[in-house]
Amino acid sequence: MEKVKVGIIGPGNIGLDLLHKVLRSEYLQPELIVNIFQSDGINYANKLGVPTSIEGISAILKKEDIQIVFDCTSASAHLTHAPLLKESGKFAIDLTPAAVGPYCVPAVNLSEDMLDLDNVNLVTCAGQATTPIVAAINAAADVEYAEVISSISSKSAGPGTRANIDEFTVTTKRALEDVGGADSAKVIIILNPAEPPIFMRNTIYTKVKNPDTHVITEAVKKMVEIIKGYVPGFKLLLDPIIQDNIVTTVVQVQGLGDYLPVYSGNLDIINAAAIKIAETKAKKMLGGMAHV
């Protein structure tokens, strides 16, 4: 079966876990993974038989057959990469906080219009885990206020996450409002040092205008099934509990263990969302090629 060739910028934990998911894909082929120096990640990719380069984004730009690019670097780096990828006609999936393109949460707003853009942003791990739930509750009950407490294993929070905690909370809050539909929102992140490491858990509180238990519960459960379609480790731990007009629910994310440990569900979900976007884009591209 014909596949769409993709590139990955940044062979860190996120990039290498993403690489495993690309290798398993029916629609994507890893054509090149790049860094700006020889690293353990580059060596690891070489052992998997994946082409690599230490010329950074310039190596990606030279390859006209690469049509989709995952940027797993940093916000500052992506601000440099984005216009170059756009100029070269490549579809950029941004896994950094740069947010050059709009937030894309596959379960909520992955549309034809979104796929026609040149750049989309993956928000944050908490954004991918909780925005769909808030969107489901909003559709069912009109959310006035959403508050998310995202608890992840301290071991799964690398230096990039720790250095960008402020951006993490602000970006997730915006996604809850702009994509999830909440009138206002607040986000708290907890790095839990427990041993053995915990799975990612997100407690979601919403204040709603139409607190109908049955309607809200059905909407949440339907959304959970949609998310599980591309994030198998996603789980509803607590059915919505409604007291007056406050809805409380809890979701958990367990990783697949492709490259990262299973407790790194926070990293797994953002990669799973990125793959969902890329495969949907690839299927559209392959369908178009079939009609040429």
Image (cartoon, rainbow, N blue to C red):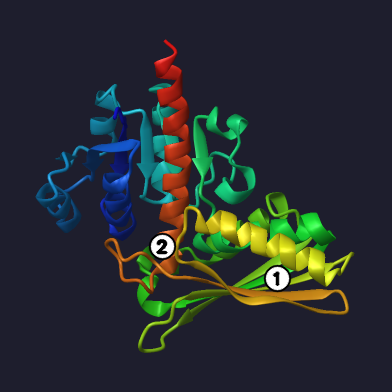
**274 versus 292 height, above or below:** below
Q: Which mark is residue 147?
A: 1
> Left of 43 or right of it: where is 261?
right
Residue 55 placement (x, y as % from top left): 20, 37
**Which residue corresponds to the image point at 33% horizontal and 44% vertical from the top-left?**
25
Q: Which mark is residue 2?
A: none
**74 versus 146 height, above or below:** above
> Left of 99 or right of it: where is 217?
right
Q: Label 1 amino acid?
A: Glu
**Residue that extends furthest to the bottom in the rendered view of this protein:** 195
Q: Label 2 amino acid?
A: Leu
**86 versus 280 height, above or below:** above
Q: From this viewpoint, is residue 83 visible?
A: no
**Which residue corresponds to the image point at 35% horizontal and 36% vertical from the top-left?**
27
Give the residue number, with chain letter if any, for mark 2: 267
**Which residue corresponds to the image point at 44% horizontal and 13% vertical from the top-left?**
291
Label 1 crowding class (10 Å Cα cut-off): few <14, some 14-19, many 20+?
Answer: many
**Which residue corresponds to the image point at 68% horizontal and 58% vertical from the top-left?**
176
| Labels 1 & 2 near each other (Cβ < 8 A) | no
> Left of 129 or right of it: where is 71?
left
Residue 102 placement (x, y as % from top left): 59, 41
Q: Secondary structure at mark 1?
A: strand
> Left of 46 or right of it: where is 122?
right
Residue 115 placement (x, y as % from top left): 54, 32
Label 2 crowding class (10 Å Cα cut-off): few <14, some 14-19, many 20+?
Answer: many
**CA–CA distance between discs 1 and 2?**
21 Å
Seen from the viewer's position, the closer of residues 106 and 188 is: 106
- Which quadrant would residue 14 be assigned to in this image? bottom left
